[in-house]
Image (cartoon, rainbow, N blue to C red):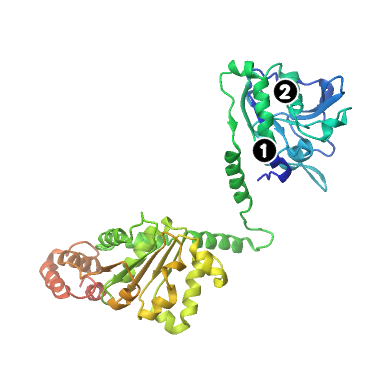
Amino acid sequence: MFQIHSCSLIATIIIVVTTQIIVGVNSFSESDKISSLPQQPKVEFQQYAGYVTVDEVQKRSLFYYFVEAEVEPASKPVVLWLNGGPGCSSVGAGAFVEHGPFKPSKNGLIKNDYSWNKEANMLYLESPAGVGFSYSANESFYDFVNDEMTDDIEKKVLRFYGSLMGMAQVTGEGVGIRALRRGNQLTMDQREKMVQPVTLLKDHQLDAWKAALTQVAGLSGWDSKVTRPENMLIEEIVKDISRKLNLNHSFLNDYQGMIGIEKHIEQIQSLLHLESEDFRVVGIWGMGGIGKTTIARAIYHKLATNFSSRSIILNVGQEVERAGVYHVKNKYISELLGEDSTSSGLSLKSTKALLVLDDVCHSNQVKDLIGTCSNFGEGTRIIVTSRDMQVLKNAEASKIYEVKEMSFKDSLQLFSLNAFKQNYPIEPYVDLSKKGTTFEVGATEMAEEVTASDGDGK
């Protein structure tokens, strides 16, 4: 990915010229044609470089470097690139550091995989006079940017194309905006004849683009030379992606067939009020084995993509007893932030998190693990499951969902799925199954699965 260096960000002008009036390489002198640059790889496109005199009296000439588009140059636009400053070379920085066809290396020039001439004809102009190879007998032109610089640029373009009637888009920032406004005034008559109007992009638009490019440029990846063998590298990549997505696809497939799970998900989701940006704790309460964990996991995996970070901790009570509160807290913080817990205080506030704490046994466990709402960012949702209603009340849960006993209909379906591998009993066992289901109603989902599995179709 190309990087735009600081000097070019001070004032950059790009002029895109439509191909309706472009003569192509015939616009350039044959004496300016470059047969090959030193240690240049073989290419199919043409290159030109040379001077255009913009002021005979002052002996002021601007240096240019033109690169043909790689494919079908006659149908591609021409991009005029001016590095900013003023004082930053469009050839030295723009063409050979940023987005030209080649980049220098210790072994000579190498191809730039991200060159802009893959999609456009590129014209790099050294401006104002005194920058790069451009020069003037009057050195006063070296000291500042004024309207004469804009005049020089216009003369340069006019020299090549005869008019600016084909100019479709003009963009710039900083000092470039001033030059563009001056250029627009000078070409008012031509602009009135244009099919497409000139577009002047404001600084804030370019700032947004730069911010996006800076963010992308800062993304880190994996080095195949560091992580060996290849299967270990692949495993690391898969683990990292899985951690960021935090999705268990096998579980997603498993819970879709669970009896009544959709109803539980729908009702709990309504209690979470995902449309609100406030912090919210929701409790799931019910007797042991009734399905609280299954429901919490289903909710977690369904809603995970609505949050920028997420974590689920199962068997919290046992984990706290075994390893301590700090271990459990550090575990979920690491999963939410992707880092150690040393700087967690401020970072947790900056993320919209989904946290599930399953099977919490004591009120102090919730207090020690999550503290207060001020520790978390806007839109964060915490789901706590417990057999003890008081634990959820002490956790200041805004809503508490009670997992009730299964209905006779759902119980019969669950019994049949486990005993006969279908949604209803087979004919010889209908009455017996109904009696067994009637007996089991009021028991837990887990107990019913065990009872049905013991029969196993017998």
Across and down, in percent, residue 127 comes to: 77, 32
Q: Which amino acid type corresponds to the residue marked 2 in the rendered image?
A: Glu
Name the residue rendered at 38%, 63% in the picture.
Answer: 300
Q: Residue furthest left?
A: 431
Is residue 70 visible to us here?
no
Residue 273 percent across, percent down from the top left: 33, 58
The answer to whether any part of residue 398 appears in the image is: yes
Q: Which residue is mark 1?
A: 174
State the residue at coordinates (61%, 19%): 191
Numbered tag placed on residue 154 in the rendering: 2
Residue 414 vs residue 307: left or right?
Answer: left
Q: Quadrant of residue 159?
A: top right
Q: Is residue 403 left or right of residue 56?
A: left
Placement of 273 over or under 212, stated as above or below = below
Distance from disc 1 to disc 2, alpha carbons, whole Å, reads 19 Å
Q: Residues within 10 Å of mark 2 (few under 14, many from 20)?
A: some
Q: Is residue 15 above or below residue 174?
A: above
* Disc on the earlier residue, 1 or 2: 2
Query: x and y percent of residue 245 in the render?
Result: 47, 59
Q: Quadrant of the C terminus?
A: bottom left
Three-letter residue code for mark 1: Gly
Write down the quadrant of residue 426 in the picture. bottom left
Q: Where residue 331 sits: x, y (%)?
A: 49, 73
